[in-house]
Image: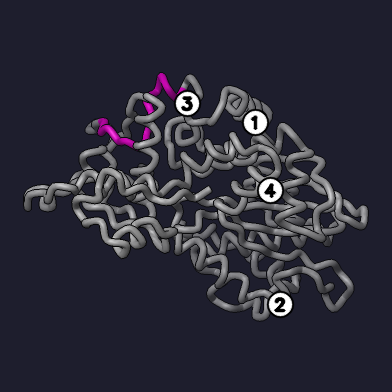
Amino acid sequence: METALSLTNIEPTFGSSDRARTVFERPLVHPPLIPDFVRRAKQVFVSTDNRFGAAARLLSALWREEQKLPIGAFIVGTKGDTRRIKLGSRISPAAARAGANFMTSDVTALAKAELLFREPGSVWDEERLWTNLLSSQALTVNLWAPMAFDLHLASAVWQTLLPGFVHSVTRIRFEHSPGRFQENYFGDGTAFDVLAEIVTPEGEPGFVAAEIKFVEEMLAPAARHRDRYDETTRESGLYLDPEDPLLRRPGFEQLRREHVMAQLMVDKGVASRGKFITIVPRLNRRAVASGAIYAAELHDPSGDTQHDDGRERVGFEAFTLEAVIRTIAEAGEAEYASLLWARYCDFHRVVRHVMETIVTTPTANDFNLAKTETAEDA
């Protein structure tokens, strides 16, 4: 599905050598480094973006333009002294009200229903959900919606991705916590982005708990420390060294909390088996690396072995967004998967746009414009 890059419009810049064609048609190893003047031209320059974030922001703007959606804005400044700055990765309030951040009208209806019937205490950033094209919550709804609508599709997808663990998917829940603010869990609001209730091949009730990231760098501030976090981490039996400081670092701390919560679900008999997974873009290298580093902290990431006391172990697996979308296509939703790919994964489109933009050498001024305002929540 990751199509080769066409050089039709940019060959004069590089010549027609086989070497040039090979370089620009091969699968991307890392995101392109986009010149600032290209980002500014599409109104997507945010100085705090890393390389992947900048590429994803530009891709979202190209998608927005293709969909003919009006540009949105974000607010900068302090109360009483604010102003709106247009940003290409945002859509206008009118477009947001029409549900344009979601792939289809059915998905928009699902998002509305999830908000209407959300679990008490669940956290939805509604402004980002409706207006921000980089929202991971919007990605979560867009990605899982076809599986929520069609449990046969969901079963086929997760039978493929987790063979030997999933026989069928019976329900999909968004922003779910088994024990929000309950002291026998953490006493806080920790929740999974998605919980898929399943039946294992052995006929046991189980679940797949998912954390989904898009442009996030796994550097979000850690939750306020609670002694209960340390206590349950030690009791979980998941970690080679439950006292390892890495498990308390930003990003890893969230994975630890959610994985331990999944283990608590099994320990308390909510389900017989469980799997905790992450889904992140392949080119979000920090998020991908975080998953690999986290897995190295575990006794048995596969979850195939029981704990010493006979408890079932909740395994961990990191998936790329691309792998999940490809599997959705192979399971029968190729058209919808293509829409997802074009919006979230087609970074060759970003490369094409950049190369076509710099066919003529830009002037020095293009590379030396003064910095614009930034926003942490852009």
> Residue 134 in magenta?
no
Residue drawn at x 21%, y 44% as measured from the top left: 357
Part of the protein shown in magenta: 84-96
Q: CA distance from mark 2 to mark 1?
A: 36 Å
Say which of 159 and 279 sits in front.
Answer: 159
Q: CA distance from mark 4 to mark 2?
A: 28 Å
Residue drawn at x 66%, y 40% as measured from the top left: 174
Of circles 3 and 1, the one toward us is 3
Amino acid type at image mark 3 = Ala
Q: Would you name the residue on which mark 2 appears?
A: 299
Of circles 4 and 1, the one toward us is 1
Q: Which of the marked residues, 4 or 1, is nearer the chain's N terminus?
A: 1
Amino acid type at image mark 2 = His
Quadrant for residue 280, please give it. bottom right
| Vertical arrangement, residue 182 with respect to residue 287, above or below | above
Q: CA distance from mark 3 to mark 1?
A: 17 Å
Q: Which of the marked residues, 4 or 2, is nearer the chain's N terminus?
A: 4
Q: Would you name the residue on which mark 4 appears?
A: 181
Of circles 3 and 4, the one toward us is 3
Q: Which of the marked residues, 2 or 1, is nearer the chain's N terminus?
A: 1
Q: Which of the marked residues, 3 or 4, is nearer the chain's N terminus?
A: 3
10 Å crowding of disc 1: few (<14), some (14-19), many (20+) = some
| Vertical arrangement, residue 160 with respect to residue 80, above or below | below
Q: Which of the marked residues, 3 or 2, is nearer the chain's N terminus?
A: 3
Labels 4 & 2 near each other (Cβ < 8 A):
no
